[in-house]
Image (cartoon, rainbow, N blue to C red):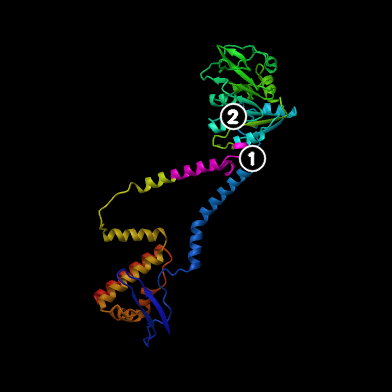
Amino acid sequence: MTTQTQTQTAQGPVRGTVVGTGSPDAVTSPVVTGDGSTGRSRTVRRWRRARWTLFVLGVLALVVAVLAVQRPVTSTTPYAPDNAQPNGARAVAQVLGRQGVEVQHVTRVADAVAAAGPGTTLLVTPGSMLLPEQADALAGVDADLVLLGADDMLVRAATDAAVTRLPGAVAPGGAVEPSCDLPLAVRAGAMRLVPGLQAEPGAADVTLCWPTDGLAALAQVRSSGGERTVTAVDDPSFVTNGAVLDDGNAALALGLLGARDTLVWLVPDPLDTSTTGEGGAPSAGAGILPPWAGVVGLWALLVVLVAAVWRARRLGPLVAEPLPVVVRAAETTRGRGRLYRRTRSSGHAAAGLRAATAETVARRLGVPRSADATALTDAVARATGRSAHDVADLLYGPPPHDDDALTELARRLDTLESEVHRS
């Protein structure tokens, strides 16, 4: 009966074939070496280590999927028609809906431009600064345009530079009469809107309402054909839930936004860069990514930055060393031992200890490197007085299953080396 065995050593393996002999102590059973693992056992071990990580990742993925599918009934976005908080505008939107106005809530400029056709009203609420291309796209729609708290770039683009916005205006000390003949302003009456708009000299068809110190709170520009109007209100608070019942805010909001059967309500997304191309076609890059791609991208960037800082703090700065680098043997041994312990590779550690012992006792007894395992076992048995089976089990037996068994194996191997040296 022949059994293949292999022992790995630091300086060179002792390899050979175990051949049955007539000796009663000869090895007659297969010898297990290495870490004793199989593909199945390694897979099971890796699964046990990774299952909790996979479970946590699965739960996070499930939560993200649920949040992505389920859209909340209300939001907290300022001036949004689905925001029921004081800074939202849900009250005005619901009243308009009961009056038969179809309110379309959009957050992308491309969607707003596509939905704002003739016979509709496009409302642009305050938001982050728009790109010049986006401002031009909004100014070019055929719908009536209502701008709330818009910056000077958008106001000038929408009114063909007939109206400008001056920042830094303060609220009037009391209610101010509209001082204009616009029907919606007359119905609203005296109000406390913050002014900030002025007409450029020589600009025609510009109506200013609620003037204070040379600035107006509302400016309306009507096209030459009278088919389209652009109305800018510097103070957007009159549409919010917290202020809509003050003075004539409700009358002004319903008059401005309920003039058409369809109202496109744009609450600009800070991450939106979409616009329209020539002829109203979507521009390159618009609509390729879903709306939540920007948020996910920022979150992923934040995770990468945190991971980079964490790893940098853990590893420390890079240190350049002249080559070759001399590493002490004790340091190498301790490092390899820590790696074995971290990966729980007690079988590999045991194989290294056994191989080193086999190399040491073989050199002490004069057993050549070409000798097989049986010859080494018989030589050690004769030198120590142990049985060949006991020596074979110690040098080539199964791997230990835990750290305690590995410690006991190391102690027994050290005892065996001592017995050989004393022989």
Question: Where does the N terminus fall, quadrant-wise?
Answer: bottom left
Callout 2 amino acid: Pro
In this view, the residue farthest toward the bottom is 22
Residue 180, x across and y down, in percent: 65, 13
Mark 2: secondary structure? loop
Q: Residue at x 50, y 59 (%)?
A: 48
Q: Nearer the viewer, residue 364 or 420?
A: 364
Residue to which mark 1 is pinned: 71
Where residue 7 is drawn, which disc sits there? none
- Is residue 136 at least partly visible in the picture? yes
- Is residue 108 at least partly visible in the picture? no
Q: Nearer the viewer, residue 200 or 16?
A: 200
Residue 407, x across and y down, in percent: 36, 64
For mark 2, does the 10 Å Cα neighbourhood hold few (<14), some (14 to 19), or many (20 or more) residues?
A: some
- Stretch of the chain drawn in magenta: 278-306
Residue 204, x across and y down, in percent: 61, 17
Within the image, what quadrant is residue 410 found in? bottom left
Separation (CA) of disc 2 from disc 1: 17 Å
**Relative to residue 55, is residue 120 drawn left or right?**
right
The verdict on residue 299 being magenta is yes
Callout 1 amino acid: Arg
As drawn, 285 above or below 266: below
Residue to which mark 2 is pinned: 78
Q: Residue at x 38, y 79 (%)?
A: 389
Q: Counting residues from the N terminus, which is met first, the one under dot 2 or under dot 1?
A: 1
Within the image, what quadrant is residue 331 found in? bottom left
Mark 1: secondary structure? loop
Q: Residue at x 37, y 47 (%)?
A: 314
Q: Could you tell me if the residues under marks 2 and 1 are in contact, i.e. CB atoms within 8 Å?
A: no
